[in-house]
Image (tube, rainbow, N blue to C red):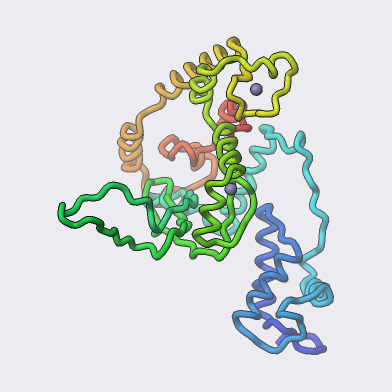
Amino acid sequence: MARKMGPATILTQQEEDQIEEWIVKKAMLGFPLHPEDVKDSIQGLLTESPRENPFTNNRPGIKWFNLFLKRHPEIKKRNTEVIPKDRAEVTKENLEECFNELNNFLIEHDCVGIFEGSTRGRRVLNLDETGCLTCPKTGKVLGPKQLPDFYEVTTGSEKQSITVLCTYSADGSALPPMVVKMGKRYFCDYCQRSFVDDIESRKKHLFGVSHLRMKKEYYAMIRDLKTLVQEERSKELCRRFRNTGECSFGVLCNHTHYSPEELAHFEATVKLQEEERSKLPKIEEWIARKAELDKKIPVDAHVNRLTTLLDPSLPPSLRLPSWSDISSTSLLEWG
Ligand SMILES: [Zn+2]
Ligand SMILES: [Zn+2]
């Protein structure tokens, strides 16, 4: 036992080491933890596996945290450097740097195999969450004529929305979906506020004027250029906006804030985008080509980053982007 003198620690040596490893790895990945995150996690641990401790509500305080730092000199409290927006812009150098770091991380943790052999692509995952209603709106249903009313039995106990996390790999296979259990509060993404989740409050909120307005505004803001041109073309010019450069109705104005020249320019852009898109290979062609190329690659091919990330048989999203790909991308459109 390599313990020093003094009272026993509240967490076991193994637990402390795990926390240290977690802090170090997160920081290396560019997501440094805040002391409160660490305290959250320890509070969770002590609540799940209760033991005697001097903390209030199982949550360690600053005193414990400072002693923890003393026991783990590897970890230092540092101020994060907040990167101003103009400095955060993508350059060729910091992009390469990013890929180099990713590469070093993969090598260091012996993970380069995700790009290797016939399973490559299967272990590069993309995931996103989506909400579904457990009791969808009923529509017209069919039944015998003599029955005046009939009810539809649905699997959902009430109108609830559950969150499902879908995960797909770069080679197109899917992982089992993960389902997030319903919380007690409903958070409205449009309005950025939450309320107690029951049918009444939800109805009141979702049909409320302010919610409908926020929702409409949101969709008006994210519509693509093609929809924008279509919608704005059908409106008359907003005099208020033309004369003063301002209109309090914003994106919800019944009149358009775009000049005919601007709309013509957008339309030309849409046309160009569509032409570019039509030049891309079809997914079937790409899959066939990938299958051909995969046959030629020995399973234990030596992997190094450049040949790996430049391999033309990789799905486009896994390939190292060229500088011209980056410089021609409108970063504002990234999610
Ligand atoms: Zn809302
Ligand atoms: Zn207007």
Residue 334: name its quadrant: top right
Residue 331 drawn at (x, y percent): 62, 32
Left or right for 295, reference 43: left
Q: Classify residue 82 as left or right of residue 225.
A: right
Depth order, front residue of 192/158? 158
Q: Position of residue 71 (x, y in %)?
A: 79, 76
Residue 26 sits above or below residue 316 on the image: below
Q: Position of residue 269 (x, y in %)?
A: 53, 17
Name the residue: 34% across, 63% down: 155
* Foreground residue among 22 and 208: 208
Q: Number of marks in the image? A: 0
Q: Outermost residue toward the top?
A: 261
Point 74% across, 66% down: residue: 36
Q: Which residue is rendered at x = 48% and y = 57% of the image? A: 163
Q: Position of residue 133 (x, y in %)?
A: 42, 55
Quarter the N terminus occupies: bottom right
Q: Is 3 left or right of 142, judged from the image as shown?
A: right
> Residue visible at 70% across and 89% down?
52
* The C terminus: image quadrant: top right
**Closer to the camera in the image, 138 or 164:** 138
